[in-house]
Every structure is written in structure tokens, then in C-alpha cells.
Image: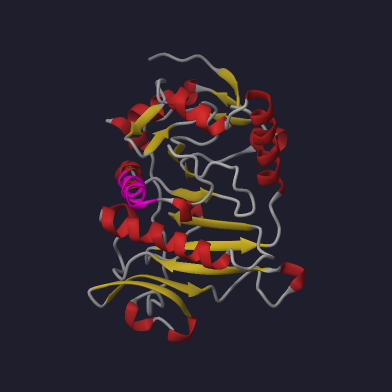
């Protein structure tokens, strides 16, 4: 499959990406440092967790499998009206050195269910408008502690970029009488960017991918947040998420993944974005806002599908 450089516009947002395959590098050439941790006591290991910090636990057979604790270095807090919000750390597993991609599908499913539990609970605070569940893996992605963990950031402020996406989505729906993401899913499941689908979820590499090997996972049902997933959808989500992350783990590629959900808007379509950090935005991206991606999403889809 040969590609020439091409400027691509996002599906409906006013964003552009330059796909420049002449700069492509094979994943096996990538070298990424693992997340680092200072030697000594790990505060995420079960025996060291401060019981006062524990917010929620998912147990099985009497064992704590996923634990939510308060973030001791929060950027926002419930007692600060100038920066109102809350932050939590989700300890993905009691196993200290096991990478997220190496967890069982069941354990990954439990992490997703913890995201759902905490989203439901935090959303009871009517001052909160935005809940971001995310994971940083690898030093390039901002991780600094080796024990597998994810995070939740909840704020009274809806980020302008998220607000802009909502407005564009609403405009698309007015003009086309349908959800833009429902239309995107149907289109991409027939394209060379398709990675995987079953009766519950769809996964593909977006047409105007901003990151090398970027991938999106959607529920086929039109759901607005993770709390609405049913049993089978949780299982399917965990299955494909593990499949994609195992591919990145094989080449030691750092990544961020995060849930796209706005609790105050039930018309949106919930999905998860995986954005690998194999490439670094430099002068063109920072100076112009135009992103150069040297991995065409069609090649990225093949990478994941093999």
C-alpha cells in the first residue's frame, strides 16, 4: 500500500492533519523508556495503601482487585471554589510490576467497571460538569510510577475543546438528522481503517489521526457515558482494549488512553481514544496547529489487525 502526502480534515471538526508517509518508521525501530519509579516503598501495593485515602474497592473472593484512592497532589479539590473538582487514582491491580496490557481481560473489565462506579458517584455532585477517566503508560506519556494505575479528573469546567466538539456534533446532527459518530462508525466499518468489530463495539483508526497508531473504540449502541454499558459491552470493550494495548506493548510504545464522556450531555456518543506517544509534536505542530502524522491510519489498522 503506497501513500503520498495528503492533508486530511477531521470528520466534522475544524481540524487538519498532514499524513506524510515518507517519514514513516516501522514500530520495531521505536525505543521507549518504561515508566520509572523511585526505589523503595510503593504506596500502591496493597500492604502500603493508606486506608484513609481509600474511596472505593472492587473485590473478588475477599481480595482487593481494583482500588480507588484520593490523589494526594490534586490540581482541583472540592473545598476550593476557585478550582473546584476532584481527582482520584485507580490502582489497576494489586500486582506491582504487571503492565496493564498484561492484565487478564477480566481484570481490565474490572478497571472499566471502576471507572463506571466512580463516574456515577462523582456525577451526583451537580457542580461537576466533566469527568475524565484516563491512563498514562510510559515516560513519554507522563507516567512516573511503575505500579499499574489509572486516574480520574473531574472538574466544574467543561474544557473549551470538548465544548467545541459538542457544538460541532450538534450542528452535524441538525444538518444530517443523525449522530455524527454513529455515521462515522458505519463508514469506518467498511473502510481500510477498520480494526475490529463485534455486535457490541467497533474499533478503527480515525481518518485524520493526530498520533501514530491512534485508535478509537466505540459502543455500537448510542450511549453517552460508561455507566450505561451492559455486561456484554464491558466484556467486548475489555477484549479489544487489551488486544490493541498488547500490540503497543510488543514494541514498548508509550500511550495515553481516555474516555470521552460529558455527564451533562446525554446526546453525545461515548468512546475511548488510544493515543500512542511514539511521535513528538514539534515546531510545525506547536507553531501552526497543523499536525504531521507519518503513519497513515490505514497502515496503523493493519498493524493492529495482524
Q: Residue at x 38, y 56 (%)?
A: 34
From the viewer's perspective, tell me whether residue 139 is left or right of residue 230. Answer: right
Q: Is residue 109 above or below residue 76?
A: above
Residue 287, quarter of the rendered image: top right
Closer-to-camera residue (120/218): 120
Q: Is residue 280 above or below residue 264?
A: above
Q: x, y percentage for residue 225?
A: 52, 51
* Magenta stretch, residue numbers: 230-239
Closer-to-camera residue (277/185): 185
Q: Is the magenta stretch mostly helix, strand or loop?
A: helix
Q: In which quarter of the image is the N terminus?
A: top left
Kindly tell me whether residue 103 is visible in this rendering.
no
Residue 59, quarter of the rendered image: bottom left
Q: x, y percentage for residue 247?
A: 32, 41
From the viewer's perspective, tell me whether residue 230 is left or right of residue 158. Answer: left
Q: x, y percentage for residue 243?
A: 30, 43
Furthest residue toward left:
61
Q: Residue at x 36, y 51 (%)?
A: 234
Give the total of numbered labels: 0
Q: In this view, does 274 lie above or below 213?
A: below
Q: Which residue is drawn at 38% across and 76% down?
A: 42
Q: Quadrant of the C terminus?
A: top left
Q: x, y percentage for residue 174?
A: 68, 29
Amino acid at each position: 500500500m503506497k501513500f503520498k502526502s495528503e492533508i486530511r480534515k477531521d470528520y466534522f471538526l475544524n481540524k487538519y492533519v498532514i499524513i506524510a508517509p515518507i517519514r514513516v518508521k516501522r514500530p520495531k525501530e521505536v525505543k521507549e523508556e518504561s515508566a520509572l519509579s523511585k526505589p523503595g516503598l510503593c504506596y500502591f501495593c496493597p500492604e502500603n495503601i493508606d486506608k484513609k485515602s481509600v474511596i472505593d474497592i472492587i473485590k473478588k473472593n475477599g481480595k482487593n482487585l481494583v482500588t480507588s484512592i484520593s490523589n494526594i497532589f490534586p490540581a482541583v479539590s472540592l473545598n476550593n471554589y476557585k478550582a473546584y473538582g476532584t481527582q482520584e487514582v485507580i490502582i489497576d491491580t494489586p500486582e506491582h510490576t504487571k503492565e496493564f496490557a498484561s492484565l487478564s481481560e477480566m481484570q481490565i473489565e474490572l478497571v472499566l467497571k471502576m471507572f463506571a462506579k466512580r463516574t456515577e458517584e462523582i456525577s451526583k455532585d451537580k457542580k461537576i460538569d466533566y469527568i475524565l477517566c484516563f491512563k498514562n503508560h510510559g515516560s513519554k506519556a507522563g507516567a512516573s510510577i511503575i505500579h499499574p494505575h489509572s486516574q480520574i479528573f473531574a472538574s466544574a469546567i467543561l474544557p473549551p475543546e470538548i465544548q467545541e466538539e459538542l457544538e460541532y456534533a450538534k450542528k452535524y446532527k441538525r444538518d444530517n438528522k443523525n449522530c455524527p459518530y454513529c455515521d462515522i462508525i458505519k463508514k469506518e466499518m467498511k473502510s481500510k481503517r477498520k480494526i475490529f468489530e463485534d455486535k457490541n463495539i467497533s474499533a478503527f483508526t480515525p481518518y485524520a489521526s493526530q498520533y501514530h497508531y491512534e485508535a478509537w473504540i466505540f459502543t455500537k449502541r448510542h450511549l453517552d457515558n460508561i455507566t450505561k454499558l451492559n455486561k456484554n459491552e464491558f466484556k467486548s470493550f475489555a477484549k479489544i482494549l487489551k488486544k490493541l494495548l498488547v500490540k503497543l506493548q510488543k514494541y514498548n510504545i508509550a500511550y495515553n488512553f481516555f474516555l470521552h464522556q460529558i455527564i451533562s450531555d446525554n446526546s453525545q456518543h461515548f468512546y475511548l481514544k488510544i493515543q500512542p506517544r511514539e511521535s513528538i509534536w514539534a515546531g510545525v505542530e506547536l507553531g501552526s496547529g497543523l499536525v504531521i502524522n507519518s503513519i497513515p491510519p490505514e497502515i496503523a489498522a493493519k498493524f493492529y489487525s495482524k
